[in-house]
Amino acid sequence: MTISNRLNQYLHDNKVKYDLLVHPHRLDSLSSAIAAHVSPTQLAKAVILEDHEGRKIMAVLPADHKISLRSLGDKLNRDLHLLKEQAVHSMFDDCENGAIPSLGGAYNLDAVYDDLLVEAKDIYLEAGDHSSLVHISRDDFFRLIKDAKHLRFSHQNVH
């Protein structure tokens, strides 16, 4: 697998040029960034959440950060929790388990983006497998997410 079909079609439909960056197989976004020699602050990872009414939302943040469910929930006035892995996998059936492209529009999902991504010069995102990243320009990324909410809801993950 390389790029997911839906992500590829979404980028094509929106006239976004991209590069595919292949890296050694890794199971999480932070490890993928390191393996691909990409700054973790430039890799936008996706986390799928569900609220108390069953509504799903994609939260997107830098790969070296952790989501603060309380902060995001307070800002959105929603009680949020992580969606169970099996439900996430069925939503992203054209991707390897856990390799979620971080463009909610490609999957008809509402999304919220952490303001920290504004600082990145270029943006990388999971392509849909654990061995490649999609590289797009910052301008294209922000054009694609212009209608989404932008908030500050994460903190750096200390290793």
Image (cartoon, rainbow, N blue to C red):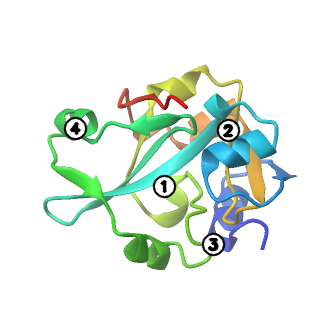
Mark 1 lies on residue: 104
**Residue at point 55% right, 64% down?**
98
Q: Earlier in the sequence, mark 4 or mark 2?
A: 4
Front position among marks 2 and 3:
3
**What residue did someone put label 2 on?**
140
Q: Secondary structure at mark 2?
A: helix
Instruction: State the separation of the CA atoms marked 4 and 2.
Output: 30 Å
Instruction: State the quadrant of the N terminus.
Output: bottom right
Q: Quadrant of residue 55?
A: bottom left
| Labels 3 and 1 touching (C-beta < 8 A) | no
Report the mark closest to the observer, 3 or 1. 3
Rounded to the nearest angstrom, the CA distance separating label 4 from label 1 is 21 Å
Residue to which mark 3 is pinned? 96
Q: Earlier in the sequence, mark 3 or mark 1?
A: 3
Q: Is residue 145 left or right of residue 4?
A: left
Q: Earlier in the sequence, mark 2 or mark 3?
A: 3
Q: Residue at x 22, y 37 (%)?
A: 70
**Residue 111 vs residue 21: left or right?**
left
> What residue would you read off at disc 4?
70
Give yes or no for contact between labels 4 and 2 (Cβ–Cβ under 8 Å): no
Q: Nearer the viewer, mark 4 or mark 1?
A: 4
* Amino acid type for the residue under numbered disc 3: Glu
Q: Residues within 10 Å of mark 1 (few under 14, many from 20)?
A: many
Secondary structure under tag 4 reads helix
Answer few, some or many: residues within 10 Å of disc 3's Cα (few below 14, many 20 plus, some between 14 and 19). Answer: some
